[in-house]
Image (spheres, rainbow, N blue to C red):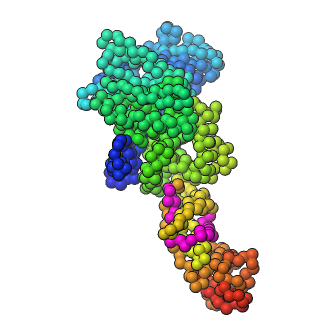
Amino acid sequence: MRLLFILTGLLAALVIRAQIPDISPAAQQVEFNKLVYTEGLLFSSTQQANVTTGTGSNYDVKYHRLEITVDPAVRAIQKGSVTTYFTATSAVNSVAFDLIDALFVDSVKHNGVLISHLHFNDIVTITLPSSIAIGQTDSVSIFYHGVPGNSGFGSFTTDWQNDSIPVMTTLSEPYGARDWWPCKQTLNDKIDSIDVYVTCPEKYEVGSNGLLISSIDNGLTKTYRWKHRYPIVTYLIAFACSDYSIYSDFAYLHGDTIEILNYVYPQNLAVAQQQTPQTVRFMHLFDSLFTPYPFGSEKYGHAQWSWGGGMEHQTMSFMGSFGFELVSHELAHQWFGNRITCGSWQDIWLNEGFATYCTGISYEFTEPQYWLPWKKLSHDNIIAATDGSVFCSDTTTSNRIFNGRLSYRKAAFLLHMIRLRIGDDNFFTAIKHYLNDPLIAYKFALTENLKYHFEEQSGIDLTEFFDDWYYGQGHPLYTLKWGQFPSSRLIIELNQQPTHPSVDFFEGPLPVRLKSATNDTTIILEHTYNGQIFDLQPGFPVDSVIVDPEILVVQQNTVIKTDIDSDDGIVVYPNPIKNTAEVKFDSPLYTAVRFELYDISGKLLEGRDIQNAEFGSFNIDMTPYRNGVYFITVWSNYGKDSSSLKKAIRKKIVKV
């Protein structure tokens, strides 16, 4: 899902580049910078979302038939019925469905016979005529009408196009399905198949899940039947009703044709027909990177609505516009969110983080000039605050579940950083294995399922990574100090300070670019502890060091150049010292070295000759000494052939 609100000032927003054909790259960049949005809908912090009730724990839903009569100009269900076929998972005497009390249940039938029910506290409890055993299938039909609720993002909405033509749409994520139909509102049971019948005034069209089987003219009304035969989670069942212009694009994959069916407002038809064909290239991209389109025997499509963003209803996303990012994001959800659905709202990043990252890689693979700007805007939004985890600890409010900074962008960068850590081949192969895993394909997954496939494919234990980046909050603040010897040998000291106390240290790779006027090279520093020293041979004089120039890691940094005196070619790291200091010296300048340590009074504490095995660097153990100021003297012949020690270099160090 991608719901949008305009931000003021510079609140680290995403930029969505409009799809403008046949203009210059410079003009495209201007358009790219015009539209500033963010994902997630702005809610007050006190707004509460409905929570899953846990109904239906004793049965498995096999089939729903929704039959609804509406007029898009009137926000009501004039007449509705839902027939549910279910299989008992334990001995069943009664079944319960979620439905808000504001909707009136007219009757409940079992095999055409009225049976008793109780509608209380947003639950319809139905007593069956007789108990059914485990594995036995039965069915009930609930007849109802009334004014639906409107929780979450607006679960049942009426609006207008051109201020005169009514539009009716549904959006049940996360907890809004029960606002308009009796269901099992849960993230542990997908419905095997559905039929959606919507009757409305004959001048309107209806879009929904699956394939349009029929549209029957009743005189003043029409009845549309949509048939969907793939497993589907409750919140992805939807319909849209309005005056639509209808046309199709087509994707050709593996010898098959996939229809991309578009329902758009007539006044937007010309623009939409220019923009929706880009869906085809995204479908080809995701097919090559992941798996074939998950619902290939039916369709994909778009239905326009009055929201600014989109919602990935299975096989037909509801769209406020048809720009590059929104189209790619909602299509990606057909794999991540629909083929595999998060098994709890705490794991919403499995839906939204993947779809957001797929927007980024759509730029990377199809319009690479926008890949770095997309990363920068996303990254800057993430670091605009110093707290917040990808793991969603509060699932009672929609604004936290769908927090744009955390569940979308930081989640996308979590994937981006795993890609850096395990490599492209392992990353994309693991995702294919995840999508094809028979335990979760067309079912539900938790974070551990994805983590397993990344680890299984790469052989790398990612437990610490997930502890830091998924459960932990914040990001690292790096301080990088560097200096270079005359021989071009370069020393880097790397420290970090996490922005939130939930993480004591972010272990992992940090890309660093070493640059001069004529040369540059990028290296990966595996940062495992504070004060870590990296001894490098770039092969050229370095004039600048740039941390993470390609934006592969969530971080902030300070780079400090430390001059290494060309007259002595010696540097001590770290300084101040806790326990151990490392003395680095430019070994081509020295053929003999002696080290001596003095306290502040000038007393000699220790001294020794440096052996060949230590040439280039040696350690000083400061553990036996108290905190304070000390001096190191290094005697050398400074490159002379004679072994006599003629030059003394004195360095001040501080133990803390």
How many marks are shown on the rendered structure? 0
Percent across and percent down for residue 168 are 34, 26
214 in relation to 475, above or below:
above
Q: Quadrant of the N terminus?
A: top left
The residue at the point 45 percent across, 46 percent down is: 367
**Foreground of the two, 461 or 54:** 461
The residue at the point 58 percent across, 26 percent down is: 57
> Where is residue 590, by image quadrant?
bottom right
**Foreground of the two, 637 or 617:** 637
565 in relation to 262, above or below:
below
The stretch drawn in magenta includes residue 544: yes
User: In the image, is 94 to the left or to the right of 24?
Assistant: right
Q: Quadrant of the C terminus?
A: bottom right
User: In the image, is 71 to the left or to the right of 470?
Assistant: left
Q: Which residues are magenta?
A: 529-551
Dominant secondary structure (helix, strand or loop) of the stretch shown in magenta: loop
**Foreground of the two, 301 or 583:** 301
The residue at the point 57 percent across, 14 percent down is: 138
> Where is residue 91, by image quadrant?
top right
Percent across and percent down for residue 616 are 68, 76
**Foreground of the two, 186 or 287:** 287
Percent across and percent down for residue 229 are 53, 22
Q: Decide if residue 147 is in sight here.
A: no
272 in relation to 223, above or below:
below
